[in-house]
Amino acid sequence: MAILITGGAGYIGSQMAYDLTDAGESVVILDNLSSGHRWAVPERASLVIGETGDQALVSALIREHDVKDIIHFAASIIVPDSVRDPLSYYRNNTVNSRALIEAAVQCDVRSFIFSSTAAVYGNPAAVPVAEDAPTLPISPYGWSKLMAEIMLRDASRAHGIGHVILRYFNVAGGDPRGRTGQSTPAATHLIKVAAETALGLRPKLEIFGSDYPTPDGTCIRDYIHVSDLTGAHSLALGYVRSGGVPLTLNCGYGHGFSVQEVVAMVKRVSGVDFKVENAPPREGDPARIVASSARIRDALGWRPRFDDLATIVDHALGWERQLMKQFPHGGRGFGETA
């Protein structure tokens, strides 16, 4: 038996693949390598290049590898891009997820772990936001993920597939063992961008919006270390395998930091006072969003190990230095297709 990880050559998916292979699980990865990397895949995992929306391919993989569990990471994730090109987000995040869920049902997959997002909450009326808060996305990205959540819940009720939906807050950091990390070209994640700027890979960092209704005028986010996030997935997988009822859970620490606070931390940890400029706010960005994490702690016994902004930043900087050594001439293996 094997676990199928979609998007397993990407940032979070590759960390998940390492966690599972470290634990002795058999893993097969499906990734189109549009933003993932062949070199990020663990040696003990099998990589198949393809699309999650290709039902014939997915069904063949499930049968060939006797897949009983799916962890679905593959998605487009950049909020401003979703505003500019919503239809591609609805195709990749919604239509392809529907195809994957149908293949899972037809092939008798027993558990499905879905990576969703805090963007389903939009601009929440109360912070921290709990899982039963209204879901009112303010971007096509948020809507595309919410639609996939709804389809998975409906399919579960109709066909009995076990599932857990995990709503991510802001993922950052890198593998503590230095094997994988955020490697997306032209990334927009704040901590990665700040780390790249501190190491001279970017000339400056732009802060998008400085007059939000927050103490220092910049957006506030709940930053979660990637290893704590994948740890939550492992717990969710064990929960579903043991017959747990379907759950929707936030993945965040329950406290937030402003953009200004994050930038100050990156400067402190790196020892570099890099250039920062203010820029107009981006469409689709909520002012403040922080998780209520009580439910995941109670339901799964989740106990994060890296709930410390300085540690998250240190691991992110460490990964950027690793990339600089691995690809000293700037090419990081982007755009791999073969």
Image: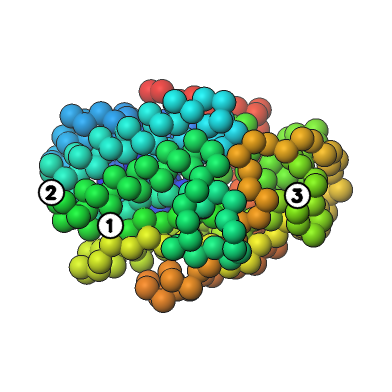
Q: Amino acid at mark 3?
A: Tyr
> Residue, x 75% and y 54% (percent of image)?
213
- Residue 199 marker: none
Judged left or right of residue 61, residue 250 is right
Q: Quadrant of residue 147?
A: top left
Q: What residue is rendered at 73% in x and 38% in y?
A: 281
User: What is the number of callouts on the image?
Assistant: 3
Q: Secondary structure at mark 2?
A: loop
C-alpha gap between disc 1 and disc 2: 13 Å
Residue located beneath label 3 in the image: 212
User: Which of the two labelled residues, at mark 2 and mark 3, occupies the earlier sequence position?
Assistant: 2
Residue placed under numbered mark 1 in the picture = 163
Q: Are marks 1 and 2 in contact (CB under 8 Å)?
A: no
For the C terminus, the quadrant is: top left
Residue 304, image x, y percentages: 51, 70
Residue with the mark numbered 2: 108
State if disc 1 and disc 3 touch (CB < 8 Å): no
- x, y percentage for residue 197? 76, 40
Q: Is residue 243 above or below residue 153?
A: below
Relative side of 247 to 34, left or right: left
**Residue at left 32%, top 58%?**
164
Secondary structure state at the residue bearing disc 1: strand
Separation (CA) of disc 2 from disc 3: 48 Å
- Disc 3 or 1, which lies upstream in sequence? 1
**Circle 2 residues within 10 Å: few <14, some 14–19, many ≥20:** some
Residue 159 percent across, percent down from the top left: 14, 51
Left or right, 266 with reference to 38? right
Q: Is residue 125 visible?
A: yes
Residue occupying the point 36% across, 66% down: 235
Helix, strand or loop at label 3? It is: loop
